[in-house]
Image (cartoon, rainbow, N blue to C red):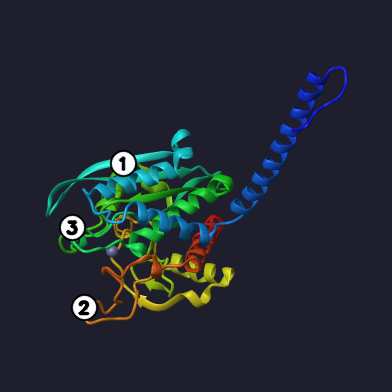
Amino acid sequence: MISYRGDRPQELRILLAAFVVSLLFFSAAAGQAQKMAHSTTRFSGESAYELTRQYIAAAPHRWIGSPDHAKAEQFIRSHFAPEAANGTFETDSFSASTPAGQLSMKNFIVKYPGKKDGIIVVASHYETNYPLRDINFVGANDGGATSALLMELGRYLRTHPPQGYSIWLVFDDGEEAIQSWSDRDSLYGTRHLAAKWSQDGTIKKIKAFLVADMIGDKDLNLDRDSNSTPWLLDLLATAAKNTGHSAYVFKNETTVMDDHLPFRQRGVPVLDMVDLDYGPPTQEHPEGGYHHTALDTLDKVNAHSLQISGDLVLEMIRLIDQRG
Ligand SMILES: [Zn+2]
């Protein structure tokens, strides 16, 4: 308690109070600005990791039709509240015919307008594997980490709007088979989107369709996927070189069936940024014992790999912009 002497103590007190309040305000604002400067200067693997943790904690068993799937939708929606407020967050609801009957699914598209005509898409599936709904499968790396990667990319793009092509983040649903993988039972979300965007002409504007899948793995190595477009594979090698991450790409050559296929079939340049090699191989899972098992948990993912993956996506975008 401070007491004042003088003729007009009341006014003095108000003046002093105003002074103290403004001091507090400015120091709080300065602190906030410092925090903002720290969190907005670059894509943060730490932040992507933290988002992975929060996402799989909020919605661990996100198979289609589950209560956690609705929670996952809500998590994505609230992360992109600023985009929803300015009309750049879209929900694409559809019904898919599956071996388990008609199922309703949702894709989310978040749009960051650029300065050049054309779109670069970065996609990740966000649901968990339906046949694994009865085991404790949380898909920390398979769907979890890459959804978080896209959420962190969105946070970055808010303060670093695209200078070249527009960037669209796609959270697609129903990547996984409902029963067992076939052309008809898989890739529900991206098949729906590719058909829809063919009809409305959007597909002609897509310069590249990049898929991120299972690239939060601590033991990161992006595969050379022979279903991806050769010039985009070359560009990924360049992106890895430019960012100092060459040690993390192309140890393995594979042919991957993933969310890029419906777009590849329609002539869009595609790249699957995927690391199939996940955990020590077992007889049942020769590609790695963590894939599609209850072992795909948060401890298999780390901030370092998410940083590398984020760096690679952003460098890919820069290189694609440079091409034309
Ligand atoms: Zn999967």
Q: Residue at x 45, y 55 (%)?
A: 51
Which quadrant holds residue 93?
top left
286 is higher (above) or lower (below) than 103: below
Mark 3 / mark 1, whichever is N-terminal: 1
Residue positioned 21% across, 64% down in the render: 135
Query: Residue 231: x percent and y percent?
Result: 45, 66
Mark-to-mark CA distance, 3 and 1: 20 Å
Instruction: Give the mark nearer the N terminus: 3 vs 2.
Output: 3
Task: Nearest to the eye among marks 3 and 2: give it.
Answer: 2
Secondary structure, mark 3, is: loop
Q: Is residue 33 visible?
A: yes
x, y percentage for residue 50? 47, 57
Looking at the image, residue 42 sits to the left or right of residue 293; the answer is right
Residue 19: x and y in percent read 77, 31
The amino acid sitting under disc 3 is: Ile
Q: Which mark is residue 92?
A: 1
Q: Nearer the viewer, residue 301 or 268?
A: 301
Type of residue at label 1? Answer: Asp
| Amino acid on which disc 2 is placed | Glu
The residue nearer to you, when weighing 319 against 252, is 252
Q: Of label 1 and label 2, which has the lower sequence position?
A: 1
Above or below, comparing residue 14 to residue 148 in the picture: above
Q: Which residue is mark 3?
A: 178
Name the quarter showing ligand 1: bottom left
